[in-house]
Image (cartoon, rainbow, N blue to C red):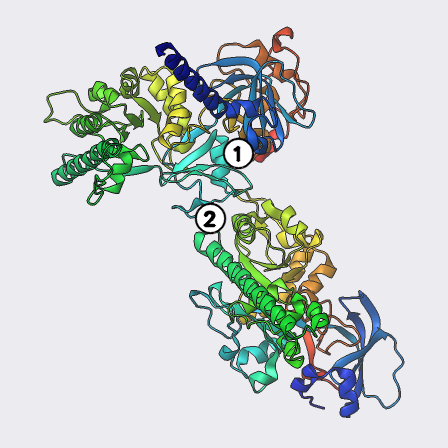
Amino acid sequence: MRLNPLLLSLVPAALASSAFAFDLQAIRVGRAETVSHGVIEHAVVLVEDGRIVAVGPDLPIERGIPVVDRPEWTVMPGLVLPYSRLGLDGRAGADFTPEVSPSPEILPRAEEYAEVLTYGITTIGIYPPGNGVPGQAVAIRPKGETLEEMRIKEGAYLKVYFRADARSKKTVKDAWAKVDEHDEKVAKAKEKWTKDQKGKGAKSEEKKDEAKPEEKKDEKAADAKAKEFVPPAADPKVKPFLRVRDGKMLPLVSISAAADWAHWLDAIGERKFDFALRVVMQRELDLYEVHDEIVKRKCMLVMEPELSYTTSTMRQRNLPAEFANAGNKVVLIPRGEDLASHETWRADVGEMVKNGMKREDALKSMTVYGAALMGLDKDYGTLEKGKVANLLFLNGDPLEPGTKVVAVMLDGAFVHGEVRQ
Amino acid sequence: MKFSTMLARSARTLAVAALAVPVFAQDPAGGEAQPGAAGADAAKKDEGEWFAVVNGDVYSGTGAVLRGATVLARGGVIRKIGHDLEIPADAKVLDAQGLRIYPGLVALNARGIASRFGGGEFADTFDPYSQNLVLALAAGITTVSDSGVAVKLKRREVKGVVVRERYQSTLSYSSAAPRGKSELDAKFEAAARYLRDYRDWEEQKKTNKDLKEPAARGVDPTIRSILENRTMARFNAANRSDLLGIARLAQKYKFRPIIEGAVEAWTVADELGRAGAYAVVVPRTRRDKSEELLRDGGSSIENAAILHRSGVQVAIQATSTFIDLGGIAGRDVLHLPIEAGFAVRGGLPEQAAIEGITIVPARILGVEHRIGSIEVGKDCDLILLDGDLLHYQALVQYTVVDGKIVYEKDKELYYAHIRPRPAAQPTDAPDARRDKGEEKPADDDKPTESGDEKPEDKPAETPEDKPKDGAADEG
């Protein structure tokens, strides 16, 4: 019954099923919060090979398939916490190390991971600490004997700490200047290569045209076709920014005020790339000043589920809801790094719903949006056919403070809760 | 022959004049909106949005007052000032009926406004959303100097906020530090000698090409740039003897010093005037006379007035250099006009007092070509008040920076509840036109295009005392 999570994450379910004899199992619950398709009453979730193979109301269950039948339960996707330093030290300097991953810091079997798994948190994005550009986040599952077992994805997003100061702006400008430098180098090498090819007899002219910028970065493909142009390797500090530019990784830009936003825009200038914002919620936060601009750019936001005040007043506002209602993807994370905050995470998000956030947005803020930030939303964050079977079972409404976790399934296996079949 | 030479010379003069005209007329030419007339520069200036303030009394800051006039700007630069101007259809129009229009104020040494964390690099740290910024705009301040840098108080944008980087060099020339004083003397002497030698060399080079250029080694670059008028020398001095020393130094080496503090400057005003000094004074400063001194000394409320009479350019600074929301109000940087009012109490003409918080500090910062008065070709930085700028009751109703409304009293948190505009009271002599503004409906504070009526044509009405409902909620 116990599955190998590493294999599951690497091998698509369809392929795996032919190679391994995995059990098909059914879970019948009173209610399913699919996140993607609303609520399904009397839902059945079919799980095979660690993936969801079907979700629907009163699906017929073939004889012989083991069934967990709990009409009093509610099921939802396992929670995705993309922004965390759980179990790790948060102190660091202000370096420019975009190539760094926090993986070496992670201690498998740390108590915190086992604990938050019982809260229903099944995916965690660990980010590197520090100001400046400290590195890239790694997505893990909070269970495993080794780092390899835990790891889902390296380079989940690029962490950028940005404040309205000369240093931050210089860091950003320099980083992009390096990208330009690299592009120039590639262009020059290409020119030289083209000339050489022509000299050789101009046989590979057709292929030259195929070498579009995206392909150029794909070094493996370039190696495979030896005759094709091989661009000079990028500096490890430049590579992450190339991925950002090509839309393969989101930078998560930490700001703390509207002024930071204004200077961030000034620093990136005319460059076009998507980015997400990490906004540290404070008692007074003037981000509403730039609300329209952030909405226009469709930035994903990572915030704590907290209310704030209009500057210099006692007028309370729900900034996460304001952005969510305007169409931005808002990721809500636990209010603190302590375990208690993780335990009350769902309830804290529930508070935001009571203050004007849509229920649907609130559920997404803890699941699929966090997965999207890490580029994992194809596999995680909703109850849909084909997704990884990370399931959270509750005894009621997930957003109500009294609701308890009754069981947790990770990669198709129950890892928490008393489950009788 | 002689005559023809003269003719040729005068022709050359004419040619020079003809060349010079476009240079001087560039801004006004832009103001006349004649595209193509003044080259690429002017063509560039002919871009941007039109903005017009109509029906206000324009107190230009140069001494001129135009009643019921229009200020027309494009791309943040004033293009025309006058009556019966043709306003482009796409212009944003602000009706200043019953309001006075002054140039935006310039606050010297104001801290904590231009940046969230303070200290330099304002192009990278300027907070265009800060509450201090809004408070400063509400006080009529449109430019501040912080750490010697002139920063335009733009709102919601960070581009182009630094108008000029450090234009001043701070020197010390005090009898309290005699060694520093004699060292500075020596530096000035060396720099002056070098410049003299250099000019001689330039002259003699024409005949003797082998002559060596005088060595600039050992010449203090700061002092040299002061003598070459590239930098302004800034002193902090309060004592009579120090002020006198600076005045004499400036007279000797022919530079115009900026003197901050200048408490006892009134005792040596004639010397400072002869030196062409700028004085930055705090009219409310109090200081006792030194007991050892037989001559006049200590502070005087007449300081600014006496300096002004002696030809010193007087800039006025508030008692406190930052925005102070605690303690007793009225002493911080938000109360520049109040501070200027104290100078008026001491005898400074009102016009000079206004100049002391507009054009004179602009000169000190080296930005007077853009800031400090309402003139064609200058930045459209305006403040619209419901009365005399120097009157304690007057409130800024609108602040305009670079041709954009960046503060509107009735729409902001701080003063909206105080005399909402339709019920604004005249703050000086009864004025029919001001009362007129009050008969407008409360929500009619949006800019309108009806600008042609002469305010005088309408009958005067008695002001209504009723404050508008709802407007006080902000408090």
Q: Quadrant of residue A92?
A: bottom left
Q: If the image is split into quadrants, where does the N terminus of chain B sit?
A: top left
In front of the other: B474 or B284: B284
Label 2 sits on what residue type?
A: Asp
In front of the other: A58 or B275: B275
In front of the other: B117 or B423: B117
The chain containing the residue under callout 2 comes to: B
Residue visible at 56% across and 65% down in the picture = A188
Q: Secondary structure at mark 1?
A: loop
Are the residues flagged by discs 1 and 2 from a single subunit?
Answer: yes
Residue B385, compared with residue A10, is above or below; it is above
Percent position of residue B439, x then y:
65, 16
User: Of the residues under marks 1 and 2, which one precedes in the sequence?
Assistant: 2
Residue B403 is at least partly visible in this image? no
The disc label shown at residue B1, or none: none
Look at discs 1 and 2 and give the one toward the viewer.
2
Percent position of residue A318, x then y:
63, 51
Q: Secondary structure at mark 2?
A: helix
Residue placed under numbered mark 1 in the picture: B414
Q: Quadrant of residue A375?
A: bottom right
- Horizontal side of A411 relative to A48 (left or right) equals left
Percent position of residue B30, x then y:
56, 25
Residue placed under numbered mark 2 in the picture: B124
Label 1 sits on what residue type?
A: Tyr
Q: Quadrant of residue B297?
A: top left
Q: If the image is split into quadrants, where does the C terminus of chain B sit?
A: top right
**Label 2 environment density (alpha carbons within 10 Å; few <14, some 14–19, many ≥20):** many
Whole-Å distance between the Cαs marked 1 and 2?
28 Å
Residue B90, compared with residue A370, is above or below; it is above
Residue B453 is at least partly visible in this image? yes
Residue A378, compared with residue B385, is above or below; it is below
Percent position of residue A19, x then y:
76, 91
